Amino acid sequence: MVSVFLYLVMSKRLSPMVALILIPALFALLAGFAPDLGDMVTDGIKSLAPTAAMLMFAILYFGIMIDAGLFDPVARAVVRVTGNDPMKLLVGTVALVAVVSLDGDGTTTFMITVSALLPIYRKLGVSPVLMTGLACMTNAILNVVPWGGPAARAASVLRLDPQEMFVPMVPALAAGLVAVFVIAYALGVRERAKVRTGAAELVTAGGDGVTTTASGGSGEAPGGDFDVLAADRESLRPKLLWFNAALTVALLVALIVGVLPIAVLFMIGSGLALVVNYPSLSQQRERIAAHADSIVAVVSMVFAAAVFTGVLSGTGMIEQMAQYLLHGMPDALFPYFSVVVAVLSVPFTFFVSNDAFYFGIVPVLAEAGAQHGISAMEIARASLLGQPIHMLSPLVPAMYVLIGLARVDLGDHHRFAIKWAALVSLVVIGAGLALGVISIH
């Protein structure tokens, strides 16, 4: 089911939303689960409804902040640092994502990153696909912090101390982050050569100065409707810059502390942002309409993913995959079991949600490890080493926010990023083995 879904999406034979709905429904019917399909999908919708609400109002909130000009100083600062050098831009992308990702929330990280950097990518003619791929890999590594989703799930399900679990992993995760910086540098050198070649050809041909993308992407010229650097747009609210900054900081602090559910925080934040920045009813309608396309695209994708997750869990596919794995593993492999778990976490964290993996599969793996003298702590750490590829999973809502705002096709995003994310995962696993995070027993 997963293979057919990925093939149809990456080959662009079906749109992601259609594939997320039809493919799991078809396989559920073929497997004889027709009477239960409705309940499966309903359960999936119930589980993802809070996420959909959070994404809807998070997109609206950050859209309002972008319109009002909150991120203009950030974008201009990045422009000054990167200049016209694609290499500095790509390395700067990784650095910005790494810093912002420390809040543990991928959605806000991607919104801030795209709002600040997309105009620069367009200006330099660099494909936004490079931005989305690098952002996913960087965020996935930083998402292993104790307050991030994967570590919290692994620690809670196995009843471990999150700090004790995380601290020994820091050098291995740092190695993965270094690998992403190296990839960004290498790709940046390539893009720098392409941009210079394109500029030379434009001068030779006497071109008219229209910007094109150097390696694919949307091909939209700079100064488009998402250009946060446009200094004359009517939506700017320069006098409210400090209010908007304080509101955003307060919102992120409340999000990290957990004062209220994330969806509720963004609902309240969106209401305050609209009332203060755009007090008239017509202005509020205009701002909401301006972001309606992005909201509908992302939220509809989340509810479509509910079919996928509902069928995966409702049919028992996840549990059976884990059981077949354990029953089919030769006894000779169990001394290497923590390494096996680390390697398996790469496809598992891509094919299934973090909830399904850490709450459904990791306990089974930990029990199997315990029978062979391997601690639950080591299994938990091993299960986190494959996270660099998780943010590319079609089951991660934040990824749809990223590619939606950047206007990048999901198939293009996966074709570029999967190979690099898999490489970074192997670097993290190799570093973990070398540094004793996981071991051969």
Image (spheres, rainbow, N blue to C red):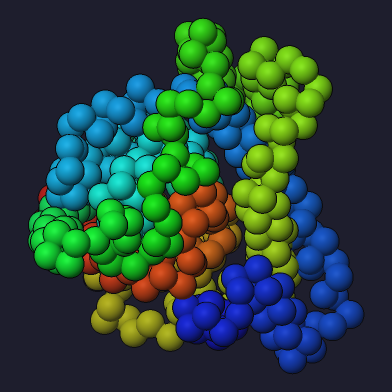
| 130 or 52: nearer the viewer | 130
Percent coordinates x, y for residue 257 in the rendering: 53, 20
Residue at 65 percent across and 56 percent down: it is: 297
Seen at 35% across and 22% down, the residue is: 73
With respect to residue 233, does 238 lie above or below?
above
Q: Quadrant of residue 217?
A: bottom left
| Residue at the image position 39 percent from the left and 39 percent from the top | 113
Determine whether 209 is above or below 80 in the image: below
Nearest to the observer: residue 187 or residue 122: 122
Depicted 75 relative to depicted 2: above or below? above
What's the residue at 17%, 43% (across, down)? 84
Residue farthest toward the front in the current orientation of the protein: 206
Q: Left or right of 50: which side holds 245?
A: left
Quadrant for the C terminus in the image: bottom left
Task: Identify which residue, 291 or 156, lies in the foreground.
Answer: 291
Spot the residue most to the right.
Answer: 35
- In the rendered image, is residue 404 in sight? yes
Tell me how many marks there are.
Answer: 0
In the image, taking residue 78 as reference, residue 221 lies left or right, namely: right
Image quadrant where residue 431 sits: bottom left
User: Residue 159 appears at what percent x and percent y?
Assistant: 49, 41
Which quadrant is home to the N terminus?
A: bottom right
Residue nearest the observer in this picture, 339 or 440: 339
Can residue 106 be seen in the rendering of this structure? no
Residue 29 position in % (x across, y down):
78, 87
Residue 200 image offset from top left, x and y in percent: 11, 61
